[in-house]
Amino acid sequence: MNTLFDKIWDAHLVTKVENGPTQLYIDRLYCHEVTSPQAFSGLKARGLKPLRPEKIFCMPDHNTPTHDQDKEIEDEISRTQVNTLAQNAKEFGLTHFGMLHPKNGIIHVVGPENGLTLPGMTIVCGDSHTSTHGALGSVAFGIGTSEVEMVLASQCILQSKPKTMRITVNGRLDKGVTAKDVALYIIAKMTTGGATGYFVEYAGDVIRSMSMEGRLTLCNLSIEMGARGGMIAPDEITFDYLKGREFAPKESEWDTAMAFWKTLKSDDDALFDKEILFNGNDIQPMITYGTNPGMGMGITEKIPTLESIPEVGRISYSKSLEYMGYQPGELLIGKKIDYVFLGSCTNGRIEDFRAFASLVKGKKKDPSVIAWIVPGSWHVNNQLKEEGIDKILIEAGFAIRQPGCSACLAMNDDKVPAGKYAVSTSNRNFEGRQGPGARTLLASPLVAAAAALTGKITDPRTCM
């Protein structure tokens, strides 16, 4: 009667504090430059070293510029954070994929594509979107800087066990509807706090038919409805994705791993604390209109009226629309946009670029649109060249930047100016998220491509 989450959690339980947290063993710690400096400083102050350095992988991504990475970073804060991570990794003997390293990129893209993320693991990182890795059947969640220090020192963490939720999406997706749309639809229905306190397992026909890239996108966004993390039971799609990747098991070890991985599923009679059911046929291409990921709607729908919002939320709702420059009850289709961003740990994988390229092939970017096309890793960048996607994008008027978090958040040079509208494939649309005063509309790579071609919010199905 155990859920997949329970099986992995219980297998990693070291001790249980009575009426308190669990001491949980961690299989993999990912470190980036923003949340690790104080953790390493804490180790030094206590005269400690990482307990199991071979379990720890470091790389910069948030502050990484997406151009001229062979030169010194101009911004002092960014330069200091990137250099400090390199110094700490060297001092403590940790694996470090620095800028221009062939395995560098966004940490949540690099982990899966190199086989560092594996089914049945517990994985943490000082970053909320660590939930991404749950797509391969792991228990993965973000932690704070003090917890990063805890894992560095002990390879364990103290955590209260979340409740379990299963979200089942049955039916089938229509043309032009992607995993990003499924995620935004679920968040809009659940609200940004609807899964608070839960670890979510995704199931159903729609989930099973998703590619691994799609599953990574879906689990990435779990945190945006308040969940501690999201996960999907591994299956043949998972195994095919992992086979042959550098850090994945090889030869006889692969057979042993497969025998274990095939046990990683919720029992047929497993009891979840909460069950939610959605119909994939109800989902259309989505777009957000407000300042949190839960303020999303089908692209052909109208912004909800004030009267349809619960009274307790009307003031914040009105402030959100005022910030965005929109009115309740109006359509977004046809609204002018200024920027398009394709990338981030949500949509910076090869499948996302294939989708974007499929729509812009043989067409031209609207000259009024500034587009940032940013692969999630150097591996993805190489795939673009191998598949000729780079040529399709360049011929359509797009320039491909170097890997990094880029315009997902305003921690590097790629900032959207105040008042400008950006259709973004990233994960958050908070006020100022992409730059002070920037206005963000979250969407899929297909919706982003349609906007880049037309200079306005456009239903991608009309461009196919």
Image (tube, grey):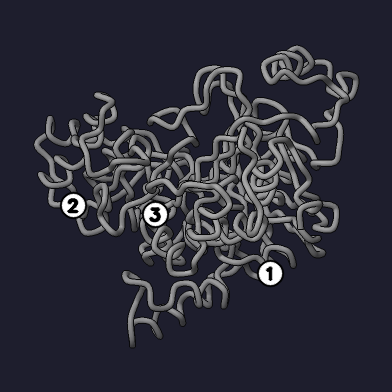
- Looking at the image, residue 24 sits to the left or right of residue 318; the answer is left
Identity, as a three-letter code, of the amino acid under mark 1: Ser
- Expressed as whole percent of the image width and height from the top left, the position of residue 342 reads 54, 45
Mark 1 or 2 closer to N-term?
2
Q: Quarter holding the N terminus?
A: bottom right
Instruction: Identify the image quadrant of residue 334.
Output: top right
Q: Which mark is residue 209?
A: 1
Residue 405 in sight here = yes
Give whichever of 415, 274 is nearer the camera. Answer: 415
Q: CA distance from mark 1 to mark 3?
A: 25 Å
Nearer to us in this view, 42 or 342: 342
Q: Is residue 32 above or below residue 179?
A: above
The residue depicted at 38 percent of the width and 45 percent of the height is: 125
Would you name the residue on which mark 2 appears?
Answer: 94
Which label belongs to residue 377? 3
- Element class at badge 2: loop
**Type of amino acid at the residue the image marks with label 3:** Ser
Query: What residue lies at 46% left-to-right and 62% top-to-bottom?
Result: 384
Q: Earlier in the sequence, mark 3 or mark 2?
A: 2
Q: Is residue 74 above or below residue 296?
A: above
Q: Earlier in the sequence, mark 1 or mark 3?
A: 1
Residue at image position (74%, 44%) is: 286
**Residue 421 rendering spot, x and y as whole percentages:** 63, 27
Q: In this picture, is 139 found above or below 119? A: above
Q: CA distance from mark 1 to mark 2?
A: 37 Å
How many other residues sit within 10 Å of disc 2, few (<14), some (14-19) or many (≥20)?
some
Horizontal side of 49 relative to 278 (left or right) equals: left
Q: Are marks 1 and 2 in contact (CB under 8 Å)?
A: no
Answer few, some or many: residues within 10 Å of disc 1's Cα (few below 14, many 20 plus, some between 14 and 19).
Answer: few
Q: Is residue 189 left or right of residue 127?
A: right
Which of the pair 252/370 is nearer the observer? 370
Tell me, yes or no, whether the two marked residues, 1 and 3, touch with CB atoms within 8 Å. no
